[in-house]
Image (tube, rainbow, N blue to C red):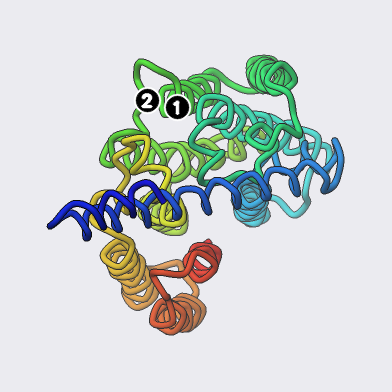
C-alpha cells in the first residue's frame, strides 16, 4: 500500500512501484507456502518418517539396484568356471551393501546440514530444513554412517576397494562442505556426481565382487558398457536434479545448470544426452560380442521412446511437472 500510494502521487513512478508491490506479494506467498510445507513435514511420520526422508530414498534405491545387478552379474560369470555358488559369500555382499548405504546416507546427510537455508526454500519437506530433525541429531547420523561405512570397508575389503570408497566419501564431502562447495559450480558438480555414481560405484562393485568370488578381475563388454552408461547417466542426474530448485538456487547464488540456462534448455540438454546414451546401448547390442543383442536393442529402444514421450509433456512453469520429469529420469 505505501508503494502504491507513492506511485499514485509521483509521475512516472507507477510501473516500478506496482512491480515492487507484486514482487513483495510473491515473496510473501512463497514464504507462507514454505512455512506451511515445513509444518506439514513436522507432523508427517514422526521420527521414523524424518529418518526415512533424511536418507533420500530415491538415491538408496539406485545404490541397491546397482549393487544387486553387479553382484548377480559377477556370480553368473563365476558359474562358467565352477558349477556351484558359494552362498557364504552372501555375507560379504551384505557387508558391502551396508557400507554403500552408509556412504550414501553420509553424503546426502552432510548435504542437508550445510544446505539447510537453501532447503527451506527448495525442499522444506526435508527433516533438517523443516525442523523435524535437530542439527545435532543430523550431525550424529552423519558421523555414525561415515565412520561405520569406512570401518566396514577397512575391516572386510581389499586395499583397492578401501581407496575407491575413501575417494568417494571425500568427493561427497567436498561437493557440499565449504570452502570447496563444488556444487556451486555446474561443471565441478557434474564431474563429482559422475565420478561417484558412475565410475567409482560400478568399477568398485565389479572389483569387490570378483575378489570375493576368487575370480580374476577382467573387464568384459558388459562391465565396460554399464560403467560408461552409468557415468553418462550420472551426468544427466547432475543436470536434472536442481530443476525444481531454481528459485532457491538463484536466491543463494548457487550456479546450477537450470539456474544458469533455465529449466527448458536444461530439460532439452538432459533429454539429448540420455537419448544418445540409449543409442550407444543399441550400438553395443548390434556390434559388441558377448551381449544379449535382442535385449540391448529392444530395451534401450523402448526406453528412448519413453524418454521422448515424457519429456515432451514437461511444463517448465509447473513444479509438479518438473518433479515428475526428474522422477521419470531416475
Left or right, 14 with respect to 55, comes to: left
Callout 2 secondary element? loop
Assess whether mark 1 and mark 2 are in contact (beta carbons under 8 angstroms): yes
User: Is residue 71 positioned above or below 184 on the image?
Assistant: below
Q: Please provide percent x and percent y for residue 281.
A: 38, 70
Callout 1 secondary element? helix
Q: Is residue 231 visible?
A: no
| Numbered circles on residues, count | 2
Question: Which is more toward the observer, 150 or 131?
Answer: 131
User: Is residue 5 positioned above or below 175 on the image?
Assistant: below
Q: Please provide percent x and percent y for residue 97.
A: 70, 38
The mark nearer the N terminus, 2 or 1, is 1
Question: Which is more toward the observer, 20 or 259?
Answer: 20
Mark 1 neighbour density, 10 Å: few (under 14) some (14–19) many (20 or more):
many
Give the number of the disc on residue 66. none
Mark 2 neighbour density, 10 Å: few (under 14) some (14–19) many (20 or more):
some
| Disc 1 target residue | 176
CA separation in Å, label 2 and label 1: 5 Å
Left or right, 42 with respect to 66, comes to: right
Q: Residue at x 83, y 45 (%)?
A: 43
Q: Residue at x 59, y 47 (%)?
A: 34
Q: Please provide percent x and percent y for residue 147.
A: 67, 15
Question: Which is more toward the observer, 99 or 240?
Answer: 240
| Disc 2 target residue | 181
Q: Residue furthest front?
A: 9
Q: Please provide percent x and percent y for residue 241.
A: 45, 52
Q: Residue at x 75, y 49 (%)?
A: 40
Question: Which is more toward the observer, 96 or 265?
Answer: 265
Q: Residue at x 68, y 49 (%)?
A: 36
Q: Is residue 189 visible?
A: yes
Amino acid at each position: 500500500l505505501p508503494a502504491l500510494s507513492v506511485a499514485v502521487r509521483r509521475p512516472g513512478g507507477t510501473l516500478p512501484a506496482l512491480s515492487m508491490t507484486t514482487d513483495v506479494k510473491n515473496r510473501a506467498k512463497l514464504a507462507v507456502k514454505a512455512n506451511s510445507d515445513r509444518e506439514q513435514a513436522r507432523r508427517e511420520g514422526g521420527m521414523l518418517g524424518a529418518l526415512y526422508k533424511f536418507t533420500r530414498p530415491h538415491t538408496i534405491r539406485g545404490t541397491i539396484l546397482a549393487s544387486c545387478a553387479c553382484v548377480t552379474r559377477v556370480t553368473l560369470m563365476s558359474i562358467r568356471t565352477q558349477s556351484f555358488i558359494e552362498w557364504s559369500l552372501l555375507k560379504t555382499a551384505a557387508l558391502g551393501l551396508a557400507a554403500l548405504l552408509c556412504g550414501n546416507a553420509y553424503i546426502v546427510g552432510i548435504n542437508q546440514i550445510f544446505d539447510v537455508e537453501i532447503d527451506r526454500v527448495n525442499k522444506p519437506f526435508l527433516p533438517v530444513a523443516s525442523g523435524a530433525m535437530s542439527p545435532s541429531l543430523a550431525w550424529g547420523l552423519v558421523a555414525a554412517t561415515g565412520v561405520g561405512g569406512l570401518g566396514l570397508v577397512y575391516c572386510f575389503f581389499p586395499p583397492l576397494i578401501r581407496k575407491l570408497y575413501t575417494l568417494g566419501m571425500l568427493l561427497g564431502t567436498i561437493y557440499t562442505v565449504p570452502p570447496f562447495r563444488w556444487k556451486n559450480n555446474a561443471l565441478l558438480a557434474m564431474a563429482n556426481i559422475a565420478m561417484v555414481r558412475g565410475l567409482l560405484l560400478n568399477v568398485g562393485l565389479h572389483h569387490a565382487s570378483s575378489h570375493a568370488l576368487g575370480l580374476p578381475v577382467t573387464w568384459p563388454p558388459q562391465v565396460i558398457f554399464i560403467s560408461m552408461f552409468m557415468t553418462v547417466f550420472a551426468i544427466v542426474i547432475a543436470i536434472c536434479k536442481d530443476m525444481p530448485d531454481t528459485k532457491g538456487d538463484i536466491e543463494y547464488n548457487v550456479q546450477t545448470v537450470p539456474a544458469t540456462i533455465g529449466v527448458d534448455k536444461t530439460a532439452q540438454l538432459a533429454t539429448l544426452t540420455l537419448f544418445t546414451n540409449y543409442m550407444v546401448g543399441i550400438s553395443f547390442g548390434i556390434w559388441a560380442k558377448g551381449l544379449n543383442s535382442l535385449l540391448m536393442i529392444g530395451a534401450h529402444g523402448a526406453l528412448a521412446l519413453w524418454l521422448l514421450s515424457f519429456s515432451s509433456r514437461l511444463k517448465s512453469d509447473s513444479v509438479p511437472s518438473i518433479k515428475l520429469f526428474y522422477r521419470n529420469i531416475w
